[in-house]
Image (spheres, rainbow, N blue to C red):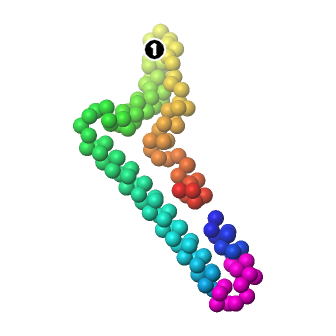
C-alpha cells in the first residue's frame, strides 16, 4: 500500500512546498514515518510468534494426555485417510471376492481435508496475508 501512496504523496509535497529544502524535509519525514510503522509491525509480528512459541512449548512439556490435541487430530486424519484410500477398498474387494459384498461407509473428506491443511499449515491464507500486507 505504501508503495502506491509514496509517489503520490511526494508529488503533492513538491506542489505544495516549492522550497526544495522544505520538500526534502517533508519527504524524509514520510520515510521516517514509514520506517517506524514497519518496525512497529515487525515487533508486533515477532511478539505474536514468540507468544505462540511459548504456548507450543508449554503444551509440549505437559504430561496431560488431553492437552496433546494436535497429535490426536493428526491420528484421526491419518486413520481417515487410511480408511478411505487403503482399508475400505481392500475390505470391499476381499468381501466381494469371498462372495459377501459389503457396502461400507466412506468418510466425508471435506472437513477432513480442511482440518489436515490447517494442521499442516499448507493453506493459502498465510500467502494471501503476506501478499496483501495484512499480516
Give the quarter of the image for residue 22.
bottom right
Q: Is residue 6 left or right of residue 126?
A: right
Give how far across and how far down residue 10 sits, in percent: 68, 78
Give how far across and how far down residue 79 sits, in percent: 41, 29
Front residue of 113 and 57: 57
On screen, residue 24 above or below 72 = below
Front residue of 88 and 30: 30
Q: Indicate yes or no whether the magenta region holds residue 22.
A: yes
Give the quarter of the image for residue 9.
bottom right
Q: Indicate yes or no whether the magenta region holds residue 53.
A: no
Count of numbered badges drawn on the protein: 1
Q: Which residue is tagged 1?
A: 95
In the rendered image, is residue 86 in sight? no
On screen, residue 35 above or below 69 = below
In the rendered image, is residue 102 in sight? yes
Q: Which residue is found at the position 50% from the left and 32% from the top?
A: 112
Q: Main secondary structure of the magenta part?
A: helix
On screen, residue 98 above or below 73 = above
Q: Which residues are magenta?
A: 10-23
* Secondary-structure class at tag 1: helix
Q: Which residue is found at the position 40% from the left and 30% from the top?
A: 76
Give how far across and how far down residue 74 sits, in percent: 39, 36
Q: Which residue is found at the position 26% from the left and 40% from the top?
A: 62
On screen, residue 105 above or below 129 = above
Amino acid at each position: 500500500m505504501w508503495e502506491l501512496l509514496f509517489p503520490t504523496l511526494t508529488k503533492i509535497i513538491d506542489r505544495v512546498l516549492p522550497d526544495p529544502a522544505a520538500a526534502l524535509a517533508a519527504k524524509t519525514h514520510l520515510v521516517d514515518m514509514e520506517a517506524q510503522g514497519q518496525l512497529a509491525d515487525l515487533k508486533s509480528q515477532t511478539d505474536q510468534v514468540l507468544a505462540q512459541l511459548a504456548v507450543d512449548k508449554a503444551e509440549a512439556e505437559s504430561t496431560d494426555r488431553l492437552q496433546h490435541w494436535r497429535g490426536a487430530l493428526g491420528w484421526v486424519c491419518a486413520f481417515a485417510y487410511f480408511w478411505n484410500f487403503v482399508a475400505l477398498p481392500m475390505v470391499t474387494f476381499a468381501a466381494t471376492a469371498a462372495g459377501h459384498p459389503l457396502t461400507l461407509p466412506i468418510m466425508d473428506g471435506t472437513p477432513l481435508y480442511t482440518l489436515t491443511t490447517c494442521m499442516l499449515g499448507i493453506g493459502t491464507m498465510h500467502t494471501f496475508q503476506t501478499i496483501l500486507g495484512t499480516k
